[in-house]
Amino acid sequence: MGLRFRVDSTPETLQDMSLAAEERFAEGLDLVTLDRHWSGVYLLGYSAEMNLKASFFRLGGERPSQQVKGLLAPARKMGERFFPGVPCELYHSLWFWCLMLRRRRRLLSRAPDAHFRDSELLRQTRRLHQTWWVEMRYRPAQIQPSEAIVAVEAASWIRHHAVDFWR
């Protein structure tokens, strides 16, 4: 049985997404330290996207065992209603998930605490959003080492606070 069949035969869950975010983060960091900045940033961006997305769903009360597929279209519709000018980029937009997470936190009256500042979420997501997007996979590498450092810092901050986003 091939990898594609094994992976596709089991629906992805929020727990899978969180575990994959950790793996992509570690792999991305490894690549950046090996001066493979473009590939490293690509994986770091995916990691941040998954952390933001999973946090949004967990904040909404979804359990780790919840399958992801059925959650995406309703989230996109909500985003289109509240943030009509922000594309979801086929569910990969860091900015989209950041704004969705902020909105849900505000609706649930989640006040910022010592571990989480709303303005910092915006700042770090914006920093990474300026360096990473899913469509960069089709482009030749053209990143500066300083941009890779920004991506590492921003993705690290998002990873570090992923649980704070929904608790």
Image (cartoon, helix red, strand yellow):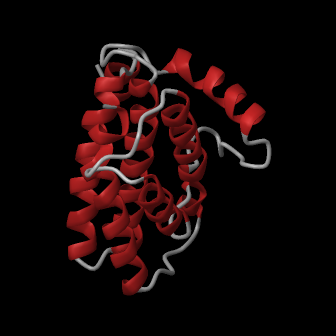
Residue drawn at (33%, 50%) of the image: 116
Quarter of the figure with residue 91? top right
Quarter of the figure with residue 156? bottom left
Residue 97: x percent and y percent? Answer: 54, 42
Of residue 105 and residue 35, the one placed in the foreground of this image is 105
Of residue 5 and residue 80, the one placed in the foreground of this image is 80
Residue 129: x percent and y percent? Answer: 54, 62
> Is 120 left, or right, of 129 in this rendering?
left
Residue drawn at (42%, 34%) of the image: 110
Residue drawn at (26%, 52%) of the image: 114
The quadrant in which the N terminus is found is top left
Asked if residue 14 is positioned above or below residue 28 in the image, the reply reads above
The quadrant in which the C terminus is found is top left
> Is 107 left, or right, of 158 in this rendering?
right
Residue 9: x percent and y percent? Answer: 38, 14
Asked if residue 12 is positioned above or below residue 85 in the image, the reply reads above
Quarter of the figure with residue 27? bottom left
Mark count: 0
> Is 40 left, or right, of 52 in this rendering?
left
